[in-house]
Image (cartoon, rainbow, N blue to C red):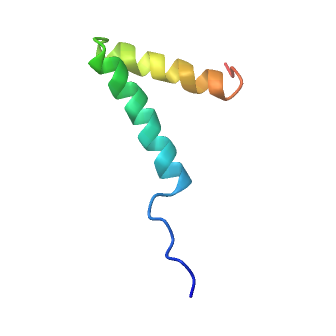
Amino acid sequence: MPEPSDPMTVLAAAAAQVHELYQSYVDAGFTEQQALELTKAVLIAGVGGAS
């Protein structure tokens, strides 16, 4: 009998990690806008520095 599929897809897991990164910046004292910009910078760097 096949195992049940994991309800957490790869994309959902990645989104949860991005949110955790963003929330960590906010918790560290950055404003929400600063946290968003920092998170965007991390994501852009992760995809090869696309402009």
Quadrant where the N terminus is found in the figure: bottom right
Rendering coords of residue 17 (x, y %): 45, 37
Quadrant where the C terminus is found in the figure: top right
Q: How many callouts does the rendering have?
A: 0
Considering only vertical position in the picture, is 50 above or below 20?
above
Q: Quadrant of residue 24?
A: top left
Identify which residue, 44 or 18, lies in the foreground.
18
Rendering coords of residue 46 (x, y %): 64, 27
Instruction: Name the side, left or right, on which 12 lies relative to 45.
Output: left
Identify which residue, 50 or 11, lies in the foreground.
11
Q: Measuring 51% from the left and 57% from the top, which residue is drawn there?
A: 9
Identify which residue, 19 or 34, lies in the foreground.
19
Q: Measuring 49% from the left and 76% from the top, which residue is drawn there?
A: 4
Q: Measuring 57% from the left and 27% from the top, which residue is drawn there?
A: 43
Considering only vertical position in the picture, is 26 above or below 2?
above
Q: Quadrant of residue 25?
A: top left
Q: Measuring 48% from the left and 65% from the top, which residue is drawn there?
A: 6
Considering only vertical position in the picture, is 48 above or below 13?
above
**Residue at far right of view:** 48
